[in-house]
Image (tube, rainbow, N blue to C red):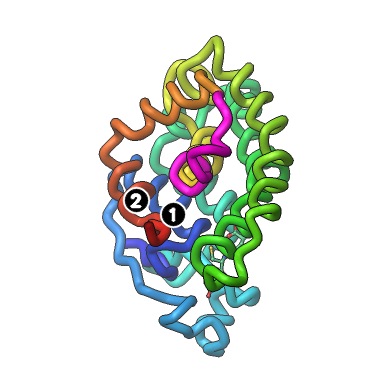
Amino acid sequence: MIKVWGRRDGSNVIKAMWCIGELGIPYERIDWGGKFGGNDDPAYLAKNPNGRLPTIEEEDGWCVWESGAVIRYLSAKHDMGGLYPADPRDRADADRWMDWSSLNLAGFNQVYLDYHFRLSPAERDIAKMEAAVKATIPRLDVLNAHLASRNYVGGDRLTIGDIPAGALIHRWMTWTPKDLLPSHPHVAAWYARLCERPAYKEHVMEATNKPAA
Ligand SMILES: N[C@@H](CCC(=O)N[C@@H](CS)C(=O)NCC(=O)O)C(=O)O
């Protein structure tokens, strides 16, 4: 059985766990990092020299880190031709959205984390939230147009391409103040489809922290 090192609510752990849930593979997850600590532990650093989460450890001790690499490795190993498209062009169609999500979409996440969980109400600056929303809208315009003609990012079924963006979109939908949330109907329809998936419910929706009301 694989071991997953990482606290359940970490944004990059969530991606790996959703992938594992979709694949239906057995795992043991060890609470690590954040309030659990351990990132500086020499034995952990031998598994992942970055001291970050998640790290996936196979039974023979072989490890993979970087959430995108984790998703690609596990889905290629366990669902070639499914979650991991077998055809190189189909794979590239999906795969590019993984990098796109990390490089283009994820920027709002740190601002939202600060606003909702790290800063006291007196320290919060709504202007920073508004700026993060404004910067994200053009990214979501691109995703929205892409999803106008397909049910999932990579085509008619869930692939690796949906995972990073799909994990982030739950934060966008639930952490953006309602009066700032713009309309992206095709993104909203895709999000509704994701919300129907048991693995998404368990590893994304239930694992994502809820801001105080
Ligand atoms: N690019 C890395 C980023 C890893 C990362 O920064 N993970 C965060 C958690 S999501 C972390 O380790 N934070 C320190 C901690 O939670 O202790 C990946 O995608 O896996």
Residue at disc 2, secondary structure? helix
Foreground of the two, 62 or 109: 109
Identify the residue under disc 1.
Answer: 14
Q: Which residues are magenta?
A: 172-183
Q: Amino acid at mark 2?
A: His
Report the image quarter containing ligand 1.
bottom right
Residue at the image position 51 percent from the left and 25 percent from the top = 187
Q: Amino acid at mark 1?
A: Ile
Q: Looking at the image, is 81 positioned above or below residue 118?
A: above
Mark 1 touches mark 2? (CB < 8 Å)? yes
Q: How many C-alpha atoms fall within 10 Å of the one at disc 1: few (<14), some, or many (≥20)?
A: many
Foreground of the two, 3 or 143: 143
Find residue 109 and report its horizontal and vertical position in percent: 59, 53
Identify the residue under disc 2.
Answer: 203
Residue at the image position 30 percent from the left and 60 percent from the top = 27
C-alpha separation, residue under disc 1 versus residue under disc 2? 6 Å
Instruction: Report whether residue 76 is seen.
Output: no
Find residue 23 and report its horizontal and vertical position in percent: 34, 42
Residue at the image position 72 percent from the left and 30 percent from the top = 138
Residue at disc 1, secondary structure? helix
Find residue 41 and report its horizontal and vertical position in percent: 52, 88
Residue at the image position 68 percent from the left and 24 percent from the top = 142
Q: Looking at the image, is 133 positioned above or below residue 39?
A: above
Name the residue furthest top.
Answer: 149
Disc 1 under 8 Å from ligand 1? The reply is yes
